[in-house]
Image (tube, rainbow, N blue to C red):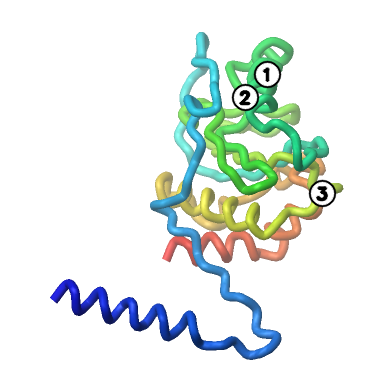
Amino acid sequence: MIRQISLSILAIVVLFSCTPQAPGTPEPIMPIQKQTLEIVTRTEWGWVPLTDSIPTHEIKYITIHHGGEDFAADKDVIKYLKGLQSWSQSDKNWIDNPYHYMIDLKGNIYEARPIKYPGDTNTDYDVRGHALICVMGNYENQILSETQFEQLAGLIALLADKYNVAPELIKAHKDYTETLCPGKDLYQYLEDGSLVKRVVELQQ
Protein backbone atom coordinates (compact mmCIF):
# COMPACT_ATOMS: atom_id res chain seq x y z
CA MET A 1 0.00 0.00 0.00
CA ILE A 2 2.80 2.44 0.92
CA ARG A 3 4.62 1.60 -2.33
CA GLN A 4 1.44 2.19 -4.36
CA ILE A 5 0.87 5.57 -2.74
CA SER A 6 4.48 6.57 -3.30
CA LEU A 7 4.26 5.60 -6.99
CA SER A 8 1.02 7.57 -7.37
CA ILE A 9 2.63 10.66 -5.88
CA LEU A 10 5.64 10.22 -8.15
CA ALA A 11 3.34 9.98 -11.19
CA ILE A 12 1.60 13.21 -10.20
CA VAL A 13 4.94 14.99 -9.73
CA VAL A 14 6.18 13.80 -13.14
CA LEU A 15 2.91 14.82 -14.81
CA PHE A 16 3.02 18.35 -13.47
CA SER A 17 6.76 18.79 -13.95
CA CYS A 18 6.38 17.86 -17.63
CA THR A 19 3.36 20.04 -18.31
CA PRO A 20 4.48 23.15 -20.23
CA GLN A 21 3.36 26.54 -18.97
CA ALA A 22 1.55 28.92 -21.25
CA PRO A 23 3.77 31.75 -22.53
CA GLY A 24 3.85 34.66 -20.12
CA THR A 25 2.54 32.61 -17.21
CA PRO A 26 4.53 33.53 -14.06
CA GLU A 27 6.19 30.79 -12.08
CA PRO A 28 4.04 29.88 -9.08
CA ILE A 29 5.43 30.97 -5.70
CA MET A 30 5.93 27.90 -3.58
CA PRO A 31 4.89 28.63 0.01
CA ILE A 32 7.52 28.37 2.71
CA GLN A 33 6.74 25.51 5.06
CA LYS A 34 6.81 27.12 8.49
CA GLN A 35 7.99 23.93 10.17
CA THR A 36 11.11 23.84 7.97
CA LEU A 37 12.00 27.54 8.11
CA GLU A 38 15.75 27.62 8.74
CA ILE A 39 17.00 30.07 11.34
CA VAL A 40 20.66 30.59 12.22
CA THR A 41 20.87 30.29 15.99
CA ARG A 42 22.75 32.66 18.26
CA THR A 43 25.25 29.92 19.06
CA GLU A 44 25.90 29.31 15.36
CA TRP A 45 26.84 32.91 14.60
CA GLY A 46 28.89 33.47 17.75
CA TRP A 47 26.57 35.52 19.94
CA VAL A 48 28.04 36.39 23.34
CA PRO A 49 25.77 35.23 26.22
CA LEU A 50 24.25 38.06 28.24
CA THR A 51 25.67 39.14 31.59
CA ASP A 52 22.76 41.47 32.33
CA SER A 53 18.99 41.33 31.94
CA ILE A 54 15.88 43.48 31.98
CA PRO A 55 12.24 42.66 32.84
CA THR A 56 10.69 40.17 30.44
CA HIS A 57 7.55 40.74 28.37
CA GLU A 58 4.84 38.86 26.47
CA ILE A 59 4.65 39.19 22.69
CA LYS A 60 1.51 40.93 21.43
CA TYR A 61 2.78 42.64 18.28
CA ILE A 62 5.19 41.96 15.42
CA THR A 63 7.06 45.02 14.19
CA ILE A 64 9.29 45.37 11.14
CA HIS A 65 12.46 47.48 11.06
CA HIS A 66 15.36 47.95 8.68
CA GLY A 67 18.98 48.48 9.60
CA GLY A 68 18.96 52.00 8.17
CA GLU A 69 22.39 51.74 6.56
CA ASP A 70 23.27 50.54 3.07
CA PHE A 71 24.35 46.91 3.18
CA ALA A 72 26.71 45.60 0.49
CA ALA A 73 26.10 42.16 -1.02
CA ASP A 74 29.59 41.02 -0.05
CA LYS A 75 29.48 42.33 3.52
CA ASP A 76 30.46 39.81 6.21
CA VAL A 77 27.13 39.22 7.96
CA ILE A 78 28.59 37.33 10.94
CA LYS A 79 31.13 40.09 11.58
CA TYR A 80 28.30 42.62 11.32
CA LEU A 81 26.13 40.76 13.85
CA LYS A 82 28.98 40.48 16.33
CA GLY A 83 29.85 44.14 15.86
CA LEU A 84 26.24 45.20 16.35
CA GLN A 85 26.01 43.26 19.60
CA SER A 86 29.26 44.78 20.87
CA TRP A 87 28.23 48.33 19.85
CA SER A 88 24.77 47.91 21.41
CA GLN A 89 26.28 46.93 24.74
CA SER A 90 29.29 49.26 24.89
CA ASP A 91 28.01 52.41 23.18
CA LYS A 92 24.26 52.24 23.85
CA ASN A 93 24.29 50.42 27.19
CA TRP A 94 21.65 48.01 25.91
CA ILE A 95 21.73 44.40 27.06
CA ASP A 96 22.09 43.09 23.51
CA ASN A 97 21.48 43.61 19.80
CA PRO A 98 18.26 45.70 19.66
CA TYR A 99 16.29 43.24 17.49
CA HIS A 100 15.00 39.71 18.09
CA TYR A 101 15.54 38.47 14.53
CA MET A 102 17.53 39.78 11.57
CA ILE A 103 17.32 38.94 7.87
CA ASP A 104 20.23 39.46 5.48
CA LEU A 105 20.25 40.28 1.77
CA LYS A 106 20.07 36.60 0.84
CA GLY A 107 17.06 36.01 3.08
CA ASN A 108 18.97 34.17 5.79
CA ILE A 109 17.33 34.57 9.20
CA TYR A 110 19.38 35.03 12.38
CA GLU A 111 18.35 34.89 16.02
CA ALA A 112 19.47 37.99 17.90
CA ARG A 113 18.22 39.24 21.28
CA PRO A 114 16.29 36.54 23.19
CA ILE A 115 12.66 37.30 22.46
CA LYS A 116 11.63 37.18 26.12
CA TYR A 117 13.37 40.56 26.58
CA PRO A 118 11.93 43.73 24.99
CA GLY A 119 14.09 45.15 22.20
CA ASP A 120 15.57 48.62 21.93
CA THR A 121 15.21 51.52 19.52
CA ASN A 122 16.60 55.00 19.05
CA THR A 123 13.06 56.36 18.84
CA ASP A 124 10.37 56.91 21.43
CA TYR A 125 7.87 54.08 20.99
CA ASP A 126 7.33 51.58 23.78
CA VAL A 127 8.77 48.30 22.48
CA ARG A 128 7.40 46.15 25.28
CA GLY A 129 5.26 43.41 23.77
CA HIS A 130 6.81 43.79 20.31
CA ALA A 131 8.72 41.06 18.46
CA LEU A 132 11.24 43.11 16.48
CA ILE A 133 12.37 41.87 13.06
CA CYS A 134 15.09 43.81 11.27
CA VAL A 135 15.85 43.43 7.57
CA MET A 136 19.51 44.36 7.08
CA GLY A 137 19.99 47.26 4.69
CA ASN A 138 18.50 50.66 3.98
CA TYR A 139 15.21 50.33 2.12
CA GLU A 140 14.99 54.02 1.42
CA ASN A 141 17.72 53.18 -1.13
CA GLN A 142 17.82 49.41 -1.50
CA ILE A 143 15.23 47.08 -3.04
CA LEU A 144 13.72 44.20 -1.08
CA SER A 145 14.19 40.96 -3.00
CA GLU A 146 11.48 38.34 -3.50
CA THR A 147 13.52 35.94 -1.35
CA GLN A 148 13.70 38.46 1.49
CA PHE A 149 9.96 39.09 1.18
CA GLU A 150 9.19 35.37 1.38
CA GLN A 151 11.54 34.77 4.31
CA LEU A 152 10.15 37.78 6.16
CA ALA A 153 6.59 36.54 5.60
CA GLY A 154 7.57 33.05 6.73
CA LEU A 155 9.18 34.32 9.92
CA ILE A 156 6.21 36.57 10.71
CA ALA A 157 3.82 33.64 10.17
CA LEU A 158 5.89 31.47 12.50
CA LEU A 159 5.90 34.11 15.24
CA ALA A 160 2.25 35.05 14.72
CA ASP A 161 1.25 31.41 15.17
CA LYS A 162 3.46 30.92 18.22
CA TYR A 163 2.36 34.08 20.03
CA ASN A 164 -1.18 34.37 18.65
CA VAL A 165 -0.58 37.76 17.04
CA ALA A 166 -3.51 39.01 14.94
CA PRO A 167 -2.83 40.22 11.36
CA GLU A 168 -3.78 43.80 12.25
CA LEU A 169 -0.97 43.87 14.83
CA ILE A 170 1.72 43.18 12.22
CA LYS A 171 3.08 46.65 11.51
CA ALA A 172 6.22 48.68 10.90
CA HIS A 173 8.35 50.88 13.11
CA LYS A 174 6.99 54.03 11.40
CA ASP A 175 3.44 53.05 12.37
CA TYR A 176 4.33 53.82 15.98
CA THR A 177 6.56 56.89 15.81
CA GLU A 178 8.11 59.51 13.53
CA THR A 179 10.72 57.65 11.48
CA LEU A 180 11.47 56.48 7.93
CA CYS A 181 12.06 52.93 9.19
CA PRO A 182 11.70 50.39 7.59
CA GLY A 183 12.26 52.39 4.40
CA LYS A 184 9.86 53.16 1.56
CA ASP A 185 10.57 50.03 -0.50
CA LEU A 186 9.94 47.63 2.38
CA TYR A 187 7.08 49.66 3.83
CA GLN A 188 5.09 49.53 0.59
CA TYR A 189 4.34 45.85 1.26
CA LEU A 190 2.80 46.71 4.62
CA GLU A 191 1.01 49.74 3.22
CA ASP A 192 -0.65 47.80 0.37
CA GLY A 193 -1.42 44.78 2.58
CA SER A 194 0.54 42.29 0.46
CA LEU A 195 2.92 41.25 3.25
CA VAL A 196 0.15 40.52 5.74
CA LYS A 197 -1.82 38.76 2.99
CA ARG A 198 1.16 36.50 2.35
CA VAL A 199 1.54 35.82 6.08
CA VAL A 200 -2.10 34.76 6.31
CA GLU A 201 -1.63 32.46 3.30
CA LEU A 202 1.30 30.79 5.02
CA GLN A 203 -0.77 30.26 8.14
CA GLN A 204 -3.42 28.21 6.33
* Three-letter residue code for mark 1: Ser
Task: State the quadrant of the N terminus.
Answer: bottom left
56 relative to 133 in the view: left or right:
left
Task: Name the image quarter holding residue 63.
Answer: top right
68 relative to 107 in the view: left or right:
right
- State which tag comes first along the sequence, 1 or 2: 1
**53 is higher (above) or lower (below) than 5:** above
Q: How many residues crowd around disc 1 within 10 Å: few (fewer than 14), some, or many (20 or more)?
A: some
Which one is closest to the eye, mark 3 or mark 1?
A: 3
* Three-letter residue code for mark 2: Asn
- State which tag comes first along the sequence, 3 or 2: 2
Number of marks present in the image shown: 3
Numbered tag placed on residue 88 in the rendering: 1
**173 is higher (above) or lower (below) than 12:** above
Q: Horizontal and vertical percent for residue 47?
A: 54, 21
Q: CA distance from mark 3 to mark 1?
A: 24 Å
Q: Which residue is mark 2?
A: 97
Q: Which residue is mark 3?
A: 142
Query: Residue at position x 68%, y 57% from top?
Result: 190
